Image: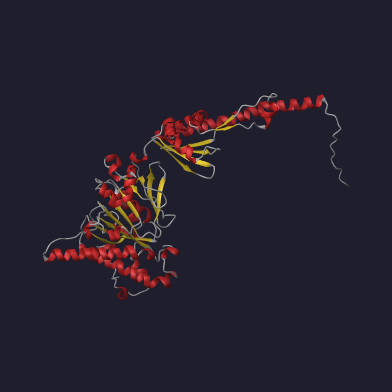
Amino acid sequence: MSAVPFRFDMAAPITVGGLSGLVDDATGYLPLLAVFLGSVFAVWGVVWVVRYLLADTAHRASIRQAVRIRFRWKRLAPMLKLASTDKTPTLMASLSSSEGKQPKPRTLVPTLKVRHDAFGVIARARCLPGVGLEEYQKAAPYLADAWGCTRVAVTQDTPGHVVVRGVRLDPLTTPTRHRPSGRAPDAAARWDLGVDEYAQPVTVDLTQVPGVTVAGLPGSGKTSLINRLMSDWAPSSAVQFACADGKVTTAHEGDYAHLVERMFAFVGDDLDDANTLFKRLVKLRRARVAAAGAMLGTNDMWQVGPSQSWPLVVLIIDEAHTYFRDHRGSDKETKRLAALAAENARLVEDLVKKGRSMGILVILATQKSTGDAIPTFIRDVCPIGLSFAQKTSDAAVAALGEDIRNWPDADPVNLQGPAYVGVASMNHPTRPGFLRIRTPLVTGDDSATIAHQTAHLTQDPATLLPQAPDRIGLDKTPPDEESGPLAA
């Protein structure tokens, strides 16, 4: 049976009764549509109220702040010259205007999407002709006043959009705590430091980085910073740790006592022990150079990344001045210590300058990183430097370089006082100038738990190499039960 095509007769008249019926039918659905829309708004309102009630005090204040910003934006934007005037009439305006009368110019206000967090708000705004990144940045101080923020920063998001970050609470003076997850990090050699002065996360990629220097007054936050690094990286079998702590004599004293289970080597303030450890690591570096071609297929470990069979070796030297300072005196013992300190500096220089491609990272911490504490031929090779509070500008320059004089707001001299414990200035490799960051507190109990849970991952990197111990000069005799994996 052949199909009969549908035909619409354009000539067929539409009767008044038929049109009236269509209108009546549509009108009959209006109550249902009103009920549907009312239900949607009611559900949205309930969700919003529940979210508000479940939020803590800081988030509630930020929610209220975000609501006020949205409500006042259309009035505020033109006042701050963040709106554009369009003198070209639209088609509808041209058709509706009377003859000889020009339509009024339109004021275009950029759309603003606002979300909140504990510290304040993050707004994403559109750019308009004549209203771009520069105009938003000029208006930032006035936005801070209008929004009730401590400070406001504007950055480029995507072409045609900017991000306006406003903080109501100062992240630098708001202490935070970090609880290690116990999971292996997603990215190798990524160091999560904390948040900047706009509460944005700050991370540093330590890939291809030979060394890091950390300076600051006692109790300013250096050890907690290193504790976080170890606690976050400890669950990875592709990382092994060694430590020389100049504040203590044995492994079970001081700030790293709860982390020694996750270290394959530890020494205290004895210069002979430190010298033995540094020699051991230099021999490891040389052995890795000999084995790299066969094991990795390349002379640069970072081309393949760290692994369980070729882990990243992190050497932490805390209170570094203990091992490098110049011993002055004419007696035999003083001369011996001076020779040891000079050799220690030479050995660590070898690790910093030659260990990067072999997967060796050196972190040096001291109170004042002047040339007598960390020799300049070591300090100046480390591309990343952090400084907590300092007492003098000279100490700040020693830690961060001469350029810190051009950034007085970030000078660590300004970080003295209890409110700034855990706050550091740093030169970030991907950002201009200097950043101020709030590093979180990592308690000894939390890091001890992680160290205990991951102690089985600890192994001497030398045992993973194919060479025999006598060929590379390393003692591979398993440590006794009393000393554990800490014998150097």
In the rendered view, tell whether residue 241 sits above or below residue 475. Answer: above
Q: Quadrant of the C terminus?
A: bottom left
The answer to which quarter of the image holds residue 389 is top left
State the residue in front, 79 or 188. Answer: 79
Q: How is the image coloured?
A: secondary structure
State the residue in front, 264 or 126. Answer: 126
In the rendered view, tell whether residue 453 sits above or below residue 30. Answer: below
State the residue in front, 191 or 131. Answer: 131
Left or right: where 84 falls relative to 479: right
Q: How many labels sit on residues?
A: 0
Give the residue furthest to the front. Answer: 100
x, y percentage for residue 199?
40, 42
Whether residue 205 appears in this view of the structure is yes
x, y percentage for residue 67?
48, 31
Give the residue furthest to the left. Answer: 331
x, y percentage for residue 53?
45, 32
Give the residue furthest to the right. Answer: 1
The answer to which quarter of the image holds residue 477 is bottom left
State the residue in front, 80 or 189. Answer: 80
The residue depicted at 41 percent of the width and 46 percent of the height is 201
Whether residue 304 appears in this view of the structure is no
Left or right: where 293 falls relative to 93: left
x, y percentage for residue 379?
30, 57
